[in-house]
Image: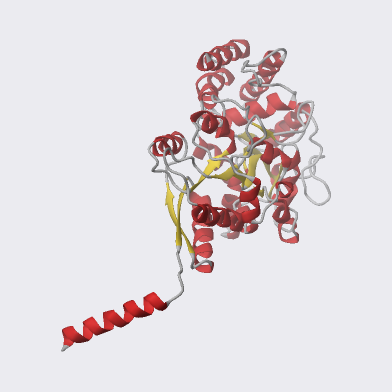
Amino acid sequence: MKIKALVTASAIAAALGAMSPAWAQQTVTWWDFFSGGDGVRMKALIEEFNAEHPDIQIKGTTLEWGVPFYSKVRTSAAVGQGPDVMTYHLSRMPLGLSEGVLSPITEEDLQTAGLNEEDFFATALDAARDSEGQLHAVPFDIHSLVLYYNKSYLEGSRFLDDEGKLTGIESVADFEEAMQLAAENGSETPVTYATGDDGGTYRVFYTLLAQQGGTLISEDGEVLPGDSTDKAVKAVEIMTKWHEEGWQPEQALYEASVALFTSGKSAFQLNGVWEVPTMKDLEEGGKLGFEWGAVEVPKLMDSQTTWADSHAFAIPHQEGTEMPPEKREAVMTVIGWMEKHAIAWAEAGHIPAYKPVAESEEFATMQPNATYATLADRATYDPRSEVAGVASPAYDAAENIISPAIHGYMSPEEAVEQVKSELQSRMN
């Protein structure tokens, strides 16, 4: 009897299923490289999307950041086993294009997502295009170098206004005066950044180069063309002086460089916006013994600009496999939803690349993000080159050549010539 009842129940269920309207749920395979606070926020966004979209479900996987991620993308796309959508650094766009792993993002795709090109900051959108202007990714944020400051070392000086906000830094000389003041007021390391690793060294060097109007790699592949060589030497000289004066840490790795600021030993920190949650968490937990702020990197040289990159969404080209229209529609629906909910992502310190969120009242009250959001229109992205961008030979050169130079192991001129030789050889 029990067996017969089970058979009958199964038959009824099958019949009901056959009578139900067709409902083809789309599963979107998602790869990202987010860990820490970024990872927590992205997982929360994915869970929220899945809860709101029973017909589209994101199946997310987090892979190791950097070279491992991009290698995995390349090999998986070559055999048609890549994800449906992935996060991608726009600074690695030239590499992705050369490898043929990025699918074009069409105007129809954007319409499906409920987006328009005009919705995005031009700096980020331009970095997402190929040489012919075709989009190959949708920018999600703008993350950049910013200047964090500890107000306690600047109290009563010209570098804090009546509201306790940083002011009066309009040149390298001004910044060095502020660091000297901080040293006299007890700061052990007036400015901290990761002087012993690739990212920290590269971003400070590149910002100083860009503020002089210098070019690291030209469009035709020349490293430090024209007077950019002299400007690069000037950038290394400045960083070297900060070492000689004892203003910056000795061969600091990333975690140590952050700890110098959070522990109150540094008056300034040159680091990415992604450390904003660290500061807020310490402050809210009562573990921060000082008042702090963060601003766009001041105009230290000839113009105000700073190194920046973007996380973006891309659809990998799958060798031998064409994505069905219904799957692509689902993928673009995911991308559009993420862009419109980017305020949650901004909590990680990022500036939304999607203007309706970046210009919203909610973002305007988000501090310190809204204070440094001005950089979005004048940020300088990495050169459009296969040897530049995150986890690239340009970053390696910063760690292996520029970092030793600013610690006195070679002259700025020697370092720059080595950088030129190393990067040029990678393109020949």
Position of residue 103 measured from the top left corner of the image (x, y, whole percent): 54, 40
Q: Colour scheme used in the picture?
A: secondary structure
Residue 212 in view in this figure: yes
Position of residue 218 measured from the top left corner of the image (x, y, whole percent): 66, 20
- Counting the numbered discs, the total is 0
Q: Is residue 423 above or below residue 351?
A: above
Residue at 55% over, 37% down:
257
Position of residue 283 measured from the top left corner of the image (x, y, whole percent): 61, 56
Quarter of the image that includes the N terminus? bottom left
Q: Is residue 85 above or below residue 364?
A: above
> As rendered, which of 178 and 93 lies closer to the eye?
93
Identify the image quadrant of residue 78: top left
> As rendered, which of 74 and 234 lies closer to the eye?
74
Position of residue 261 measured from the top left corner of the image (x, y, whole percent): 59, 42
Tell me: 46 left or right of 164. left
Tell me: 355 left or right of 69. right
Residue at 56% over, 26% down:
388
> As rendered, which of 190 and 67 lies closer to the eye?
67
Residue at 63% over, 30% down:
382
Q: Is residue 201 above or below residue 77?
A: above
Residue 347 in view in this figure: no
Identify the image quadrant of residue 281: bottom right
